[in-house]
Image (cartoon, rainbow, N blue to C red):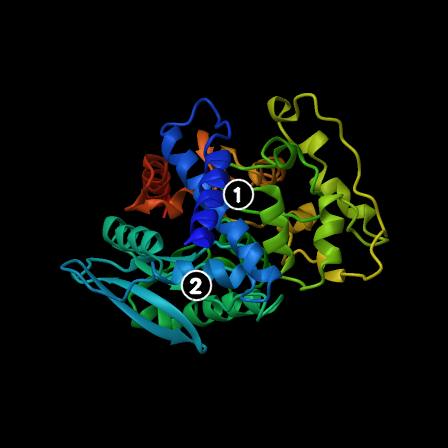
Amino acid sequence: MGYKTLCFGLSCIIYAYYISAPMPENLQEPWKVGVLDALIKMTSVTAILFENIGLIRHEEFFFTLMKVDFTKPVSDENITVTDTTFMDIPVRLYLPKWKSKRQRPAIIFLHGGAFVLGSCKQTPYDILNRCTAKKLDAVVVGVDYRLSPQYQFPIPFEDTISVVKFFLQDEILAKYGVDPTRICISGDSSGGSLAASVTQLLRNDPEFKNKIKAQALIYPGLQGADTFVPSHQEYERGPILSRDMMIKLGCLYLTKDKDLPQAMKKNQHMPQGSRHLFKFVNWSILLPEKYRKNHVYTEPILGNLNSSYPELLDSRISPLLVDDSQLQNLPLTYIVTCEHDVLRDDALMYVTRLQNVGVKVAHDHMEDGIHGALSFMSSPFYLKLGIRIKNKYMNWLEENL
């Protein structure tokens, strides 16, 4: 009894510490965000403790909890929902039941989770994709690419590109009644990174370039070259996604080596010979003035890691690292950024670079936004912000697809 009481008391003290952390003043529902932020940090502390005593890995603990929220493929009066596979990769299909007078648009949606967590079967993504299919009279494909660290880069990317190429075949589009000129690739967070890199690859592929009309990127992570951008510093402790958690989970996409995340925290992870890429992520030039504030730009330090990770130079991981010639062919683009988000500046720099080469970009910046808001659209973790982002995303698709 004494041990349990001690553990409960310590848990209450830690939770009280996190719940008392200051929240940005302009949040629509600050108390909800505070509770969610404290719960996530408490869960992370518990996961680290369990990992250190050898019970379960940090990311496995989170994933086990998230699986409670996985849904079955339940159809309703409007949408037929089925789980199947494309190229042996699990996907969830949302197909409107009514007959359409013309071929339908299609959206391929890639879920977030730092390449380590998540599934298109989670309740919030099921809500989003189901609503999108109904509102747009569209075919929606949710992709369950394999996750790290069991399946590290490039496997999640390759799973995604395999599914997309399979779906874009003429006979498959005809099977589902899809208009081959009205297809969008979408994603949130790390799914936004995948969407961006897949779109870059396909729009420069003669076989597929004319089949991608649009891309929609919701608070995406788009680079790992510079971990001292202003948003990384301003929102180091979150809310929701802290800089440490972003680095810890993101590194698992490449390696289980503990040296890489330690080097990334100091911005000393990039290998020799990569300086030529820094111009593509130079926030002192690419960020609008209001986001630079009083921050002073310093280049990442090269060559401080004993191990070399050439993947850090790969644009399939960091879509911002491509040169302008690969950007100018990109399709109509929709980007959502959130003010109080450690990943904010990645997408802001991408907006600037796309506009500079003439790509048509629609940009919604949520001044009261936090990372991962789409994941909080169902009880008990319901945020009005998530619903607003969902509606903005669907309205843009309806108008442009």
**For this rendering, which residue is in front, 306 or 76?**
306
The residue sitting at 49% across, 55% down in the picture is 113
* Residue 372 appears in view: no
Give the labeled residue for mark 1: 241
Find residue 62 and report its horizontal and vertical position in percent.
Answer: 47, 58
Find residue 184 and report its horizontal and vertical position in percent.
Answer: 42, 54
Q: Say few, some or many: other residues with alpha carbon within 10 Å of mark 2 (under 14 / 14 to 19 / 20 or more).
A: few
Q: Say few, some or many: other residues with alpha carbon within 10 Å of mark 1 (under 14 / 14 to 19 / 20 or more).
A: many
Badge 2 or badge 1: first in the primary sequence: 2
Q: Quadrant of the N terminus?
A: bottom left
Q: Secondary structure at mark 1?
A: loop
The answer for how far apart the CA atoms under marks 2 and 1 are is: 19 Å
Q: Nearer the viewer, mark 2 or mark 1?
A: 2
Find residue 150 and report its horizontal and vertical position in percent.
Answer: 57, 71
Task: Judge whether 227 appears above or below 172 on screen.
Answer: above
Q: Give the label on residue 64, or none.
A: 2
393 sits left or right of 54 in the view: left
Q: Secondary structure at mark 2?
A: helix
22 sits left or right of 30 in the view: right
Find residue 281 and report its horizontal and vertical position in percent.
Answer: 70, 41
Q: Amino acid at mark 1?
A: Leu
The residue sitting at 51% across, 53% down in the picture is 46
Q: Toward which corner of the image does residue 377 lie, by quadrant? A: top left
The residue sitting at 41% across, 72% down in the picture is 90
Q: Return the residue found at the far front.
A: 2
Q: Amino acid at mark 2?
A: Thr
